[in-house]
Image: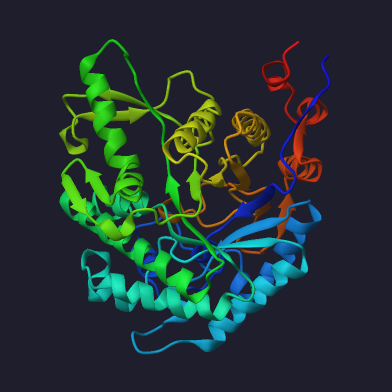
Amino acid sequence: MPKATYHFPRGFLWGTASAAHQVEGDNKNNQWWAWEQTGHTNGTSGRACDWWAGRWGEDFERAAASGQNAQRLSVEWSRIQPAPNRWDEDALERYRVMLKGLHERGLTPLVTLHHFTDPLWLAEFGGWESEAVVALFEKFVRKTVGALKEFCSLWCTINEPNVYALSGYAHGAFPPGVNNLKRAVQVEANLLRAHAAAYHAIHEVQPQARVGYALHYRPMLPKRAWSPLDRLMRNISYTGINMAFPSAISTGVMKTPLGKFIIPEAKGTQDYLGLNYYSQDTITFNLFNPKHLFTHMGFPADADFSDTKFIANIPEGLYSSIKWAAHTYPGLPILVTENGVESADDRMRPRYLAGHIHQMWRAVNFNWPVQGYFHWSLVDNFEWERGWTQRFGLWALDPETQIRTKRPSADLYADICNENGLSSDMVQKYCPEVFEKLFPS
């Protein structure tokens, strides 16, 4: 049996990721809380992981004790600016204390400024459909970064703008529940304008900052490579889902299936690329699916599926995602800002984790500049419209009692973090079913 270790570069960031609304609890002043109360989600967030009441401290301890050296978290706009003309200095101070707590535990913060949630007053004003939101977001960013810059210099402006726009305005799964592709594209254009404004504002407030955004990237393959219709649908889907922000940051022109948006101020506005990868899609032309532009998006029938078949375990997709990023932006640092899987019984997570870490190591060995990895997530949290039906945590959470229970994969990830690498002994111990694939004889 071969024995080896796949090591990563010195200084590599190992962490976990979370979003404010999913972990803080009792966050009642944003559009997601209102959406939950009207029955649009599978349960309500409630106390979530109880971070706003102080349980962030014990979870940061868990992260530090397991060898992590970084944490990705977000701030909640509706707490910091609860009304258009009012700032909550106490909320900003609470975030300062949290970030200071990360530093005290040896954890580098990566702070996301917008992760799917908006203040109620902004939603009532028209939200991201109005270009006026750009100046409002920039004002919020300047205030927040100015208050927190002592404890953070690594910023993510907007998380998954493509998911926010499409899920809220094309598919209707997120608030405000709109099914209109034209409106979704307009929202994504305003998100891009806001990202660009935030990028420049942060560098004015904190010149040494590193600023990027987190792209939800989905590699796509035509189900039948011989079919011109499958290939056409793949290209349309790929462009529509993946390429709006990247095209604009490369050229200043945001390309979408509905046309181009000229946004020159967006060109070059990233100091790193945040890459969120969960799985890879198979695309088929489907004449009977006009609602989704005659396209069916799915996974191979024989895939290694997660609990609810929400994710297929395709580690090679992370490699191809990093390859795309490295070739699109040569030399630009890459952070894997999210990667994980729902696995309540923890049977799938160890092989998912090991397989994806291995593929990331392959990418690093092409000298592609991957500098960190943030697993989703440290503790089970409220998974948006899917509520508590999906369990992504290295630690299980009972939302009623707030009891955390460590899953075996938490020990695997701790071993990876402490070793700064993935070893054959780890794979043999936690997921022997993939040993031969990761460490072939």
Residue at horizontal 24 percent and vertical 29 percent from the top: 295
- 362 in relation to 90, above or below: above
Find residue 278 and report its horizontal and vertical position in percent.
50, 38
In which quadrant will I find the C terminus? top right
The colour scheme used to paint the residues is rainbow
Q: Closest to the observer: 405 or 170?
A: 170
- 213 in relation to 229, above or below: below
Quarter holding residue 359: top right
Residue at horizontal 37 percent and vertical 73 percent from the top: 138
- 151 in relation to 320, above or below: below
Tell me if 97 is positioned left or right of 297 in this view.
right
Find residue 185 and report its horizontal and vertical position in percent.
22, 52
Q: Is residue 28 visible?
A: no
Tell me if 203 is positioned left or right of 153 in this view.
left
Q: Is residue 372 visible?
A: yes
- 81 in relation to 294, above or below: below
In which quadrant will I find the N terminus? top right
Residue at horizontal 51 percent and vertical 45 percent from the top: 332
Find residue 148 and report its horizontal and vertical position in percent.
57, 76
Tell me if 127 is positioned left or right of 37 in this view.
left
Tell me if 112 is positioned left or right of 217 in this view.
right
Residue at horizontal 35 percent and vertical 62 percent from the top: 196
Find residue 338 and report its horizontal and vertical position in percent.
54, 47
Number of numbered markers: 0
Q: Closest to the observer: 10 or 275?
A: 10
